[in-house]
Amino acid sequence: MARFMTLAEAMKETLSDGDSVAFEGFTHLIPHAAAHEAIRQGKTDLTLIRMTPDVIYDQMIGMGMARRLVFSYAGNPGVGLLRRLRDAVENGWPRKLEIEEHSHAAMANAYEAGASGLPMAVFRGYKGAGLAKVNPNIKSVTCPFTGEVLAAVPALRPDLGVIHAQKANRQGDVLIEGIVGVQKEVVLAAKRSVVTVEEVVEDFADVHPNACVLPRWTISAIAVVPGGAHPSYAQGYYGRDNPSYLEWDGIAADRDRFRAWMETNVLQAKPEDFADRVAMLEKRP
C-alpha cells in the first residue's frame, strides 16, 4: 500500500546495494530526481534495467553504481552515444560493466510477463537478427498448436521499479497522462515501487476514461518532487529541456568534467532543485 514520504526516505527504504532496479520512462516522465537520490545515497552493485537507457543511466554508470545493464538501445536521444556507458564497456571505467542487450519488443514483453507473474515472454522477434548469438537469454520455443518457432526471453521482475507521474491523490493512487511506455508494467512487475509525482490532488476529476491509473496497492512509496522528470518532460507541466541533452554530450566526453558536473549538480544538490530547473526553462528565450 502506498505511503507518502520524502524522496530520500523512499530510496533509502526500497533500494539496497545489489538490487535489480528499473528507472523507467520512455522519453516522457523519466525519473531523474529519484535516480539522483540513489546516486547521492551511494547505492552500488546494481543491475540497471531499462528500455532506451539515456542520460540518467549514463550518469549512474559513470558513478560506478552498476555492475550489469539489461537494456534495449542505449543513447542520448537526438544527440548520439552514451559516453560514460561506452567508457565502462570498452575501458572498465570506473568499473567493468556486464551488458545484456535486447530489442524493444523483448523488453516490453518481458516486463509484461513479469507483471503477469509468468516466467518468460514469448513473442515473434529476432528473426534475421544477430543478438541471440551474443545474448544467451534469448531462446526459442515451438508453439504446441501451430508449430511456429517463436522467441522467448526471461520475465523481468526488478527488485525495485521507479517511475515519475503527474499526480497522486491523497489515498495514494497515481495518474499518468500522455505517453506511457512500460511504466505501468514496471510497477506491476517489481517487488517494490517508488513513484515521484508533480503534485497531490484530492481526486482525479475529469480524467479521460482511458487514462492510466495505478491503484495504491501496487505502489510502495510516493514522493512529491515537482520537476522530478527534468530534463525530460511531463505533459501538462513542462517541456523537454533539449539544450541539457545537447550539453550532456560534451560533459560526459571527459572524465574530469563529468565528475565535476556530478559533484555540483547531483551530489551537492537536493530534490527541490528540480523545480528551480523547470522554472528556468520558462525564462529561456
Image (cartoon, helix red, strand yellow):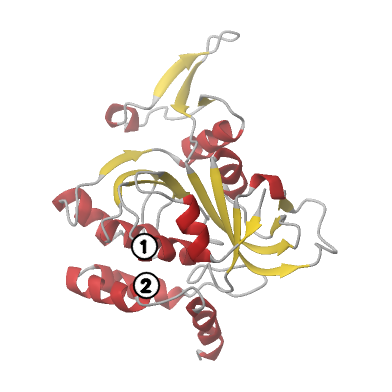
The residue lying at 62 percent from left, 53 percent from top is 180
Position of residue 254 measured from the top left corner of the image (x, y, whole percent): 19, 70
Q: CA distance from mark 1 to mark 2?
A: 8 Å
81 to the left or right of 11: left
| Disc 1 + disc 2, Cβ < 8 Å | yes
Position of residue 70 measured from the top left corner of the image (x, y, whole percent): 37, 42
Which image quadrant is residue 186 in? top right
Disc 1 is placed on an element classified as helix
| Number of numbered markers | 2
Which residue was labeled with disc 2? 266
Q: Nearer the viewer, residue 271 or 247?
A: 271
| Numbered label attached to residue 39 | 1
The residue lying at 50 percent from left, 52 percent from top is 24
The residue lying at 21 percent from left, 53 percent from top is 88
Earlier in the chain: of badge 1 and badge 2, it is 1
The residue lying at 48 percent from left, 39 percent from top is 107
Position of residue 27 measured from the top left corner of the image (x, y, whole percent): 51, 60
Q: Amino acid at mark 2?
A: Val
| Numbered label attached to residue 127 | none
Q: Is residue 112 above or below residue 58?
A: above
Position of residue 280 measured from the top left corner of the image (x, y, whole percent): 51, 86
Mark 2 surroundings within 10 Å by alpha-carbon count, few (fewer than 14), some (14 through 19), many (20 or more): some
Q: Is residue 30 visible?
A: no
